[in-house]
Amino acid sequence: MRFGLKINPIKNFIFVGITLAFISSCKENTSTTYRSFLSPLTGLNVASGKEFDVKVQFGAEQKVDSVVYLIDTVKVLSKTDTSGIKLKTEGLKLGNHLLTAKIFGEGKSEDLTSNINVLAAQAPLEYGYKVIKSLPHDTSSYVEGLEYHDGFFYESAGDYGHSSLRKVDPASGKVLQKADLDKQYFGEGITVIGNKIIQLTYREKVGFVYDKATFKKLSDFSYTTGREGWGLAFDGQKVLNTDGSNTIFFLNKDTYQKIGSIDVFDDKGAIQNLNELEMIDGKIYANVYTTNNILIINPENGVVEGKIDLSGLLPADYFKTEDEKANNVLNGIAYDKATKRLFVAGKKWPHIFQIELVKK
């Protein structure tokens, strides 16, 4: 036995009418003005120096008299037609840039926005290392800053209740001078400027200035540049500073206040967790916290030009617990300008290593 479907003609007529009305409404909506960027899509990565396509969907109901294109707040092009264009990244700093299309027509204007990320044009050169010498190191020191001057290491040890500034004999690892920080302070990066040593604290928003010869505290200063105090270095004119982001700040060498910055990118994206710093032959060397990597950075534009993989400096089983392995990581870069010796260290490591870079 087969069952047939009985259709009510009145209900069927109403259904068809509703359907036709819905279709008509959709057609009307597609003819209204809907403006947006077709390209670039939000967050497009573009290699520095390359062009990128810009195309806008303008809609149909409102006349377009002209379009002005801006990158960030700078006008880069004006057109009286709606054809696609190409824009250059030459001269743009690395990082995020806002793209605006300001559309004029019928006495009105409308702004559309998108954005691009400008990245390094090339992948960084890859380096390994060769250990030249292993020097003894005090394993109680949670290294946050390391410098080499006049035949000695100057070291900042961190951790609440254990923070200090130290002068260390490289050959023996013996601590020759020491200034302990009060227990409410977590010592961070240091740098030497003439006859003074500058030291940051982690979250306490203060830095200290010491006499290099006596370790007497001369003054303190307010640190508000970064979200936290991490690394320091001195390039001879200004202080370099990190806060755990991908930004390297430039500070005045006398006031320690911000005077500029660069954002650090390789060809894949931003490099976060920049920490300990050293200036070597005009380049910034930066440790990436919790990794075995030190980056070689162009100080003019933030491009990562090289990456040093220091895996294997310590035996894999030297630190036994997972907590030790997570915390006692590579952190410390020092350079002897006179003999061009490069030293690296880690938190509570038994050695400071003199290394030589080897291209991969």
Image (cartoon, rainbow, N blue to C red):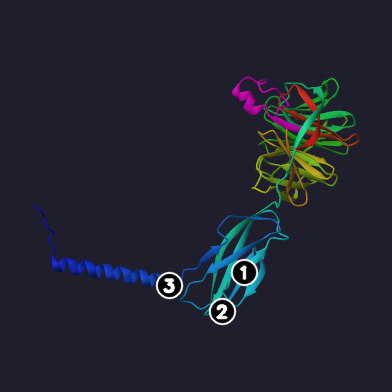
> Magenta region: which residues?
310-332
Q: Secondary structure at mark 3?
A: loop
Which comes sooner in the sequence, label 3 or label 2?
3
In this rendering, is residue 166 above or below 87?
Answer: above
Residue with the mark numbered 2: 65
Residue with the mark numbered 3: 32
Residue with the mark numbered 1: 85
Q: How far from the left and from the top, in percent, is residue 304?
A: 73, 46
Which comes sooner in the sequence, label 3 or label 1?
3
Indicate the amino acid at tag 1.
Ile
Q: Secondary structure at mark 2?
A: loop
Residue 42 lies in quadrant: bottom right
Q: Nearer the viewer, residue 120 or 96?
A: 120
Q: CA distance from mark 3 to mark 2?
A: 18 Å
State yes or no: residue 284 in magenta.
no
Q: How far from the left and from the top, in percent, is residue 338?
A: 91, 35
